Amino acid sequence: MDCTHVKELKALHQVPEVLEFIQGVESTTVYRERAIAVVSEDNICFQIAVEEQVVYSNPPTELFESVGGVLQLIPPTKSTCGCGATMSQTPVLDGQPLLFCSTAVFRAQTYKYICMDSTCNTSHCFDGGKTFILNMGSFLIHHAVLRDYMFHFLFSGTSMFNYFRVWEARQRDSGSHFFLTYHKFRMAWHAFLGLLELDTKEGFQCPICQDEPKELVMDGTTLGYHQRYKEEPQESEDSFLGTGR
């Protein structure tokens, strides 16, 4: 038997104006998830090399030139295009995205070098991998944010949405007025994961037994359900003593 809320909801579906609105929402592409093309192509190491930790820990303001408070992100020069033609030696403006870091947001301008052959559409864009920045085209995000979520997930099982809410709160505490949407954060994470160098064989292999383990222990915790959701029968005080609860 339907409750009052369900009855009211079903009644609304019979109203022509409401039905027309629902059909309009279902037919539009606004609510469909759209993929964001990533610009960065350099592979990302799971472990940061010791000699690169200084670059990783330094704020972007110490790594890039700033003009009028805007970071200038220029890729290294490239003399020859893949087609054999010469690349331009003067960088051209590619975009004006925001750079999202752990507790700060910076205005930036990205540049690119283009192929001098008019029949070639190749361009050499700012990758950001060497400076631990993921270039998503419409926005930039520092690896520190994504690595922070990675370790939260690995060590505590934090969901992506819960981490995003915490990160957003930290940004707000820092006085930021610009916030990344959850959809863009999720796309950035998938792009980061696609570039991350992971040895899956090593991760699923015993360092001692290798491919021939003597025993396997299966943990079915994630397949079960929490006991607090189970309706247990009334138990006497003695039964709690017997079960150790």
Image (spheres, rainbow, N blue to C red):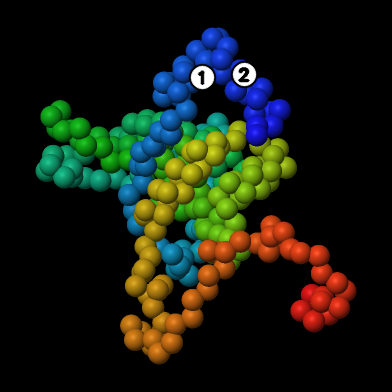
Quadrant including the C terminus:
bottom right
Side of 101 where 45 appears, left or right: left
Q: Quadrant of residue 222?
A: bottom right
The disc label shown at residue 11, or none: 2
Q: Position of residue 69 (x, y in %)?
A: 57, 34
Between the residue at mark 1 and the residue at mark 2, the CA separation in whole angstroms equals 14 Å
Asked whether the viewer can see residue 144, the reply is no
Q: Residues within 10 Å of mark 1 (few under 14, many from 20)?
A: few
Side of 185 where 102 appears, left or right: right
Quadrant including the N terminus:
top right
Q: Residues within 10 Å of mark 2 (few under 14, many from 20)?
A: few
Above or below, 94 against 235 in this view is above
Residue occupying the far top of the picture:
16
Q: Quadrant of residue 232?
A: bottom right
Report the amino acid beneath label 2: Ala
**Which residue carries the number 1 mark?**
22
Q: Position of residue 93 (x, y in %)?
A: 37, 30
Label 2 secondary element: helix
Select label 1 or label 2 by which is in front. 2
Side of 14 where 228 appears, left or right: right
Report the amino acid beneath label 1: Ile
Side of 118 where 243 appears, left or right: right
Instruction: Give 5 or 96, whichever is nearer the viewer.
Output: 5
Instruction: Give 22 or 90, whichever is nearer the viewer.
Output: 22
Above or below, 185 against 199 in this view is above
Q: Position of residue 95 (x, y in %)?
A: 41, 31
Label 1 secondary element: helix
Residue displayed at 45% across by 23% down: 26
Of the two numbered discs 1 and 2 on the same chain, state the one appearing first in sequence.
Answer: 2
Above or below, 198 against 190 in this view is below
Residue displayed at 61% across by 61% down: 225
Residue displayed at 48% across by 21% down: 25
